[in-house]
Every structure is written in structure tokens, then in C-alpha cells.
Image: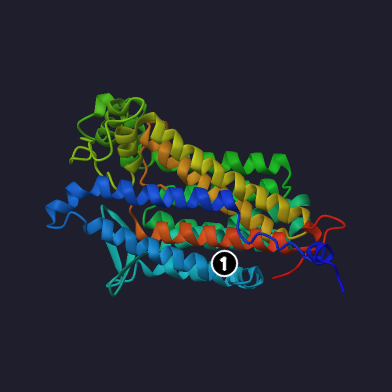
Amino acid sequence: MKKPSQLKASYKPIESRFDFWLLVAAIALVGFGVVMVASASMPRGALRGDEFRYVDRHLIAVLMGVMGAVFVYFTPVEWWKRYSTHLYILGLLLLAIVFIPGLGVSKNGATRWVILGPISLQTSEFMKLFVVLFLAGYLVRRQLEVAHTVWGVAKPFIVLVVACIFLMLQPDLGTTVLLLAVALGLLFLAGAPLWQFGALLALAAAAVSVILWTSPWRLERVKAFLNPWDHAQDSGWQLTQALIAFGRGEWTGVGLGNGIQKQFHLPEAHTDFVMAVIGEELGLVGTLTIVALFGVLVWRALSMGATAEKLGKRFEAYVAYGLGIWLGLQAFINIGVNMGLMPTKGFTLPFISYGSNSLIVSCVAIGMLSRIYRDNQLDPGSRPKGAAWQRA
């Protein structure tokens, strides 16, 4: 009969199923989002007869996002790998149906939404996830071709051009640039030759420059970005009001709910410019907290990718890299626009801004990262030599 000490020694540790820091960062960002959407949207909601109109909708989106994250967490990564190309084709179809009369809806001069009963679907948000999956699958299948031939690097961009055409017809230059940036980042990490990477980067920069110079209204945004105070009453209105909000916030802010700029001075205060509201009400402390949380999230995503790559899980590695690049870059652009570091562009702040589609897809990304982390932990190659482990 075994002694109690022997029985205790025979117990096998069970691997952690979740990345603690990833979940802390994601939950904190979502919590910040609920609080700040409530603060920023109440004046607008009051005009429509219900102060909590946008908060209630945001909470429903949070619930749907959590459900989506749980669903993805319990879906084997092999399924996403097998159907990555199919999902990209589905994304193209979703981008196309916004142009079907009766389905597509235009707001503020852009046609980006599809109305399906009570649901308003912004198809470009889901395309961000589908592009990451498609590129990860391609890089796994064509690793040697990408590393040694021009054609291997060019092919994914030729395929992405189709999605970019649909996006530019909406028009949505921001999402187009984001998708191309994610593709460039993944190709760089996959070992694309530096000269090819540089050539593609230069080509993309030239294309964006041509688009800006041939679009008068986009050019006005650039001019307003360069000197917003000269255009404070027209194209520079959003930026100047955002800068005033940050200025009023100083170190610790004017207090939660006490912001003035959200009182119909700052357009889109609960969506694209919610960071300015955070800067005004919570000050530099609140702003740096948000930046730090996104830094933790990106760090954990890239760390998971590196671990998966060491274990030979190259699809999981590229998915984790892609999700980290996407979420980090979108947050960087949104914060940069709010602070006047970039020209004004309609981009939501992941997890925080009001916008059901963006919030749901961001939560799904966290579910996918959590699944990758779990699979990394359960892989025999990740276990210390000589240790007793148990699958659960």
C-alpha cells in the first residue's frame, strides 16, 4: 500500500487552460468600454428619449462577443485551417452584398452595412479575421515559395486586391490599409526577402498617396491633420475638439462623467473618438492605462505565436501573429487619430468603442488566441523533461 507522501507525489499537474494576462487585458478593456460608452453616449441617448439607449446595445454586443469567444475557444484550430480559404470567399461575398439594393445601407456617405432584420452587419469587420486566417493557411502551404520567389510573395496580394476593390468602393480606405499592413507583417514574419518586402511596402505607400491626391475630401483631411487650427470650423473640427479634450484632462482628468467635449462638441464621441473622452475624463493616467493594456494584449499574442512556431504549429503561429498585429495596429491608429498623430480616419478602438460588429469580432479574436494558448500548453513538446503531466 502506498504511503500518503507517495500518493501525493504521484499526482500530475494539469496545464493552465487560459493565458492570465491576455484575459486580464481583454476583460479590463471591455470593462473600460462599457463605462466609457455609457459616459460618452448619454447626451446623445437623452436626445432620443433614452439615456441608456447605446449602453444597452453595447451590453448586448458584449454578451454576443463573449458567446462568440466561447464558441471559437471550443472549436479545434484544425477546422479554421481547413476552411480558411472558404471563409475568405465568404468574406468577399459579404463585402459584395452591401451593394445589393435593399440590403446595403449607406451612412455618412459610406455603404458598409447590411441590414438582416434587427441586425446591422458591418461586413468589413469580419473580413479582418478572415484575412488573417486565409494568410495563415497560405503561408503554411507555400512557406518555401514565399521565402524564395517573388511570385510566392505576390500571390496573396493579388488575391487581397479583390477584397481591397470592394472596400474602396464602399469606400473604406482605413480597412484597406489595415489589411495590407497585416499581410505585410505576416509575410515579413514568414521570411519573405527584405528587398521584396521593401518593394511591396513602397508600392503600397505609393498607391495610398495616389488615392489621397485624387480624392479631394481625403486630401482635406490630410491638410486638416497638418494644421487643424486653420480648419477648426470645417475639416479640422473633430481633431481640434479631440485635442481640446486631451488638454482639459491634464494628468488625472476632470472626473468620470464630467467631460464637456462629449456634449455635442466632439462628433462620434462614443465610437471613433471615445479615446478623447477617456483623455478628458481620466487624464493622462487613463490614457496610458489603455495603451498599457493594449501593449499587454499584443505582447501575449506575439508570445503565443512564438511558442506555437517553436512547437511546429505554424498555422497557429501565423494566426496569433496576425491577430496581434491587427488589434495592435488598429488600436495604434485610433489612438493616433484621436491625438492628432495621424489624419482623421473612422476607426473604432477595439473592445472599447461603441460598435457591435467590431466588439464581437475583437472578442472572437481573444477566443481564438485562448484556444491557441490551450493547444500550446497541451502539446507534448511544451512539457518540461522529466515532469509528469496529465491531459484533461
Q: Residue at x 86, y 70 (%)?
A: 2
Q: Residue at x 41, y 57 (%)?
A: 359
Q: Is residue 41 visible?
A: yes
In the displayed structure image, the side of residue 256 where residue 205 appears, left or right: right
Where does the C terminus fall, quadrant-wise? bottom right
- Crowd rating for badge 1 (residues with CA inside 10 Å; few <14, some 14–19, many 20+): many
Where does the image place residue 182, in percent across and percent down from the top left? 57, 49
Please identify the quarter of the rendering in which residue 131 is found: bottom right
- The answer to whether 15 is drawn above or below residue 215 in the figure is below
In the picture of the structure, the residue carrying the numbered disc 1 is 73
Where does the image place residue 226, in percent across and percent down from the top left? 36, 27
Where does the N terminus fall, quadrant-wise? bottom right
- The answer to whether 101 is drawn above or below residue 18 in the figure is below
Where does the image place residue 201, in percent across and percent down from the top left? 59, 41
Using the image as rendered, state which of residue 299 and residue 32 is in the foreground.
32
Using the image as rendered, state which of residue 220 and residue 282 is in the foreground.
282
In the displayed structure image, the side of residue 176 where residue 154 appears, left or right: right
- The answer to whether 355 is drawn above or below residue 262 in the figure is below
In the displayed structure image, the side of residue 339 where residue 202 appears, left or right: right
Q: Which colouring convention does the figure follow?
A: rainbow
Using the image as rendered, state which of residue 54 and residue 88 is in the foreground.
54
Please identify the quarter of the rendering in which residue 48 is found: bottom left
Mark 1 element type:
helix
